[in-house]
Image (cartoon, rainbow, N blue to C red):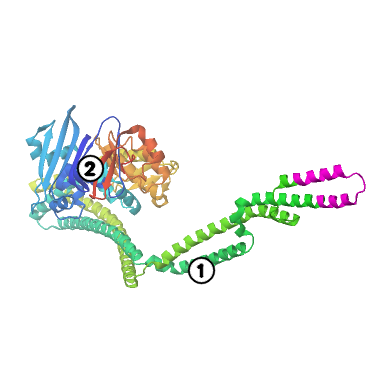
Amino acid sequence: MRLQSLSLINFGVYRGTNRFDFSATKPVVLIGGMNGRGKTTFLEAVLVALYGPNSSAYVESGYTTFGQYLRAHTNTSPSSSSAAIKLTFSHEVDGVEEVLAIERRWDTSFKHIHVDTTVRRNGSYDAFLTDNWTAYVEDILPRALSTFFFFDGEKIAEMALDGSDGQIRDSIRMLLGVSTVDVLRRDLKAVSRRIRKRKGDDAPADAVDQLAEAVDSLRKRIIEIDGEIETLLESEGALNKSIEALRSDFIAAGGEAAAQRAAHEERLRQIESQLEQVREDEIALSSGNAPLIMFYPILPKLLEEAKADYERGVMSEALCQLNELLAQYEGDAEAIRSFLSYAQHKTADSFGTDITGVTSADVSELSSLLGELPGLQEEYKRLRQREGLLAANLAEVKDYLSIAIDESSMNEAQSALETANRQLGSVKARLSTLKEERSSLNGEYIRTNAEYKRAVGSYLSSLNGAEEDDRLLRYAGLADDILERYAAHLQERKVRYLSETIGECYRTLANKQSLITSISMNPETLEMSYLSPDGALVDRQSLSAGEKQLMVIATLWALARCSDKKLPVIIDTPLARLDSAHRMSIVKSYFPYASEQSIILSTDSEVFGSYYEALKPNISDEFTLVYDEGTRSTSIKRGYFAEGAR
């Protein structure tokens, strides 16, 4: 069986007509979408298309009628109140491939929703399949086995963390066919009781009846406990969701803000003190030469002119002294006087007009200032940046302190949160008590059932084989014994193969291959034991959360392989709770080999980067679920989280 297409019309978050078309070139189909974009809806749509009101999507939803479920999952618009799901897949019958298309259509404008179901075979309407689809699909993919192939990764993770494998054991018994033998044995016991009542109330028969009633009573009590455990597990899940919502209410009312207020006030004082110190440093810097930074561009020219003025002054002073000496000179001075006149004119032409009259100290001070100003500029820049950062931090802290705290709502949410936590503690305590009681009752059931069998054997041996009732009782007892041994043999033979397959699948997935090398399964209770390389038992609690989840996935993989059915695998959010090493192991060792068609529904935080690159050689189709805030609906785009497809 391979899915060819899935059309969703106004179903769930998909408004209008949305269609997935799958090619058959490679085994993996990758569908990406953020949370709430329609990944789980895809899985539910496949289940509803195949099983309708018998689908686990509806049965586990909590709605009292299938109509209520469909109404809640219909994305209506003013222009349309109808919705539909159409699933097309190929299927091999006696070596010949046929294409089946199952379509379920309904309209929410009516008070009571009626679902029109149509089945087409190879493109043509098939009246027989339309009328008998419920029975026909059980032959293709029995509903009880669908959980091996279509499953939610989050539920698998929860099952692994809770340590509850009762559902897996039930699935194993169903796969092994032992449940059918159990029904036959119960029927035989009922027939035997009726025959013994006709025969009279002799003591051996009474003893057998009492043991039979004890066995039935223990079985019923175990079933009741299993039901109560299942209910408590549901309550535990609901309480966890409620606690998460109440914690959000507590935060929204300012609970966390109130708890952190003292810390924010202390941080406010520290930042204000630091900001004051920075501003004092700025004032101190401004009291010196720092303000001259604004004149820095013109100071080099000013220094040059100051040096020229200084040199001009020196030269003028020298010429004055020479003129004075020349006046005292008694020799021929005409040539000297001509030279000094030339020197005075040359000095005036070279140095320009005297405008400053600076001294050597002025030149030295100006030169020193030019060397100092770049450092002052950097220091001033650093202080301004520091001030800006502190101001931003101050604004952030003030924002935290400005959060309004609704004391009444906060106290109410805190009280409700504490109550919910107490209720959760009570539920967990009750679960622990029930599990211990079930374990004790199961041991008592095994002992009582063994005593019942011995009593039946003793009673049958004392009967005279002439009467019809005696013969029937004898044969019923023999048949029960044969069925018990057959069930044990069947279970033991298949359990051995199944446990080997689970171990093989786990070793393929696990990183710590030295921790668990084989799986042992009790043929009677179907409880699994994990064995180390030296044959010692590995405590389940020693496994990490990721390893426990890998064990559940390995079990489902093995169940699917042992069912001998070539069916697609659909996995919703498969990697959310796994670490990087386990993710890579799943991507490389499981997804490409889980089935001939593996449809992976992933967020961008699960299959991405190196995980995507490792999976890409095995991908045939990629889709992205794109959500439109305006229409509050999802559409389908080709490509996996490609640009514009988010």
Q: Which residue is mark 1?
A: 269
Camera sees residue 245: yes
The secondary structure that most of the magenta stretch takes on is helix
Question: Disc 2 residue type?
Answer: Ser
Give the x, y percent position of residue 320: 82, 52
Image: 568 above or below 72: above
Q: Nearest the camera: 471 or 447?
A: 447
Give the x, y percent position of residue 72: 17, 53
Quadrant (top left/top right/bottom left/bottom right) for the N terminus: top left
The structure residue drawn at horizontal position 30% and vertical position 31%, both measured from the top left corner, is 26
The residue furthest right is: 330
Q: Mark 2 or mark 1: name the one nearer the start of the chain.
A: 2
Q: Is residue 343 magenta?
A: yes
Residue 299: image tag: none
Q: Is residue 583 magenta?
A: no
Question: Which span is picked out in magenta?
Answer: 319-346
Q: Nearest the camera: 381 or 114?
A: 381
Q: Which residue is mark 2?
A: 146
Quadrant (top left/top right/bottom left/bottom right) for the C terminus: top left
Question: Disc 1 residue type?
Answer: Arg
In the drawing, does residue 451 fall left or right of residue 193? right
Give the x, y percent position of residue 641: 33, 41
- Report how far apart the C-alphas of labels 2 and 1 lie in the structure: 62 Å
Camera sees residue 481: no
Q: Nearest the camera: 44 or 267?
A: 267
In this rendering, which labeled residue sits more in front, label 2 or label 1? 1
Q: Secondary structure at mark 2?
A: helix
